[in-house]
Amino acid sequence: MKSLGFFIFAFILSQPAFAKLFTNSYISFELPDQWSCSLDKTEWICRSDAAGANREAVIILTAKEVGPTDSLAQYENYLKTPKAITGADGKPVMSQIKQVKQMQISGHAWVDGMHLGSEVPYYYTRYLATIKVQIAILVTFSAHQRYYTKYSNDFFKAIQSLRVIAAPNLVNASNSTGGIIGSASGIPMDMGDGELPNEPTGSSRSKKNALLLAILLAAIGGYIFIKKRKKT
């Protein structure tokens, strides 16, 4: 029984930590481990601090005063339309729409949409947009298509922890026209500066978790077997 408890404890400790809470004047959420955020003009840009990972994925937050084209219905319609970007050959390339829906996060309504190639080529971008009082908020989660599986669980946990904390008197008068999704600058240009190398077939974290899970299952099976033998 002691060995089973040890393996369960070790498996829990091996899971990624989500204890770093990011908070600004309008939103809060839990950052993935080894990530940090910095303010760039009107946007917060969050990236991994791990060596060589700063171009693999990015989280961007921005907010502004609600304008005439800001509403959940308009955000949803906007995301249901493919976006055109310039491809490597200079010709326009339309983004691929993966999903668009409305969802509730902690009792607050958000529009949730995902595109491939809507900001720069080869990147998935998940858009989370909402309104509270007179503030329009946009959070985007982007990752290179060859690395999206590496960050998808981190993104999921960050999205589930989103909390809107905007005060009624918080406005950005310099950016009060146009819908927030259309006016946000999107992924920093250095993210799309050439394709990244292929995603590894298995990250070290996933291999470690798989090994610990196998050990945990073996320990549980052994414990059950011993219990049955004692009964017989």
Image: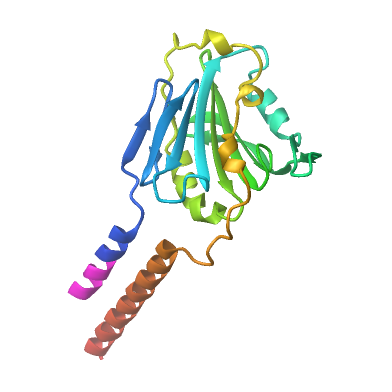
Q: Give the percent coordinates (x, y) of residue 13.
A: 28, 59
**Is residue 1 in sight in this rendering?**
no
Question: Above or below — where is 59 with respect to 177?
Answer: below
Is 128 placed left or right of 93 in the picture?
Answer: left
Q: Give the percent coordinates (x, y) of residue 165.
A: 41, 22
- Residue at (58, 60) in percent of width and height: 198
207 and 221: which one is in front? 207
Quarter location, residue 69: top right
Please, which residue is most extreme toward the bottom here? Answer: 232
Does the magenta segment cover residue 3? yes
Does the magenta segment cover residue 58? no
Is 91 placed left or right of 104 in the picture?
Answer: right
In the picture, the quarter occupied by the C terminus is: bottom left
**Is residue 41 in sight in this rendering?**
yes
In the picture, the quarter occupied by the N terminus is: bottom left
Please, which residue is most extreme toward the right here? Answer: 91
- Residue at (55, 10) in percent of width and height: 174
Question: Above or below — where is 67 with respect to 36?
Answer: above
- Does the magenta stretch mainly form a helix, a strand or a loop? helix
How many badges with numbers are in the image? 0
Q: Give the percent coordinates (x, y) of residue 97.
A: 71, 42
Magenta region: which residues? Answer: 2-8
- Residue at (56, 42) in percent of width and height: 142
- Residue at (63, 18) in percent of width and height: 70
20 and 164: which one is in front? 20
Question: Above or below — where is 194 with respect to 12?
Answer: above
Say how the picture is coloured: rainbow
Please, which residue is most extreme toward the left here? Answer: 2
Q: Give the percent coordinates (x, y) of residue 52.
A: 46, 51
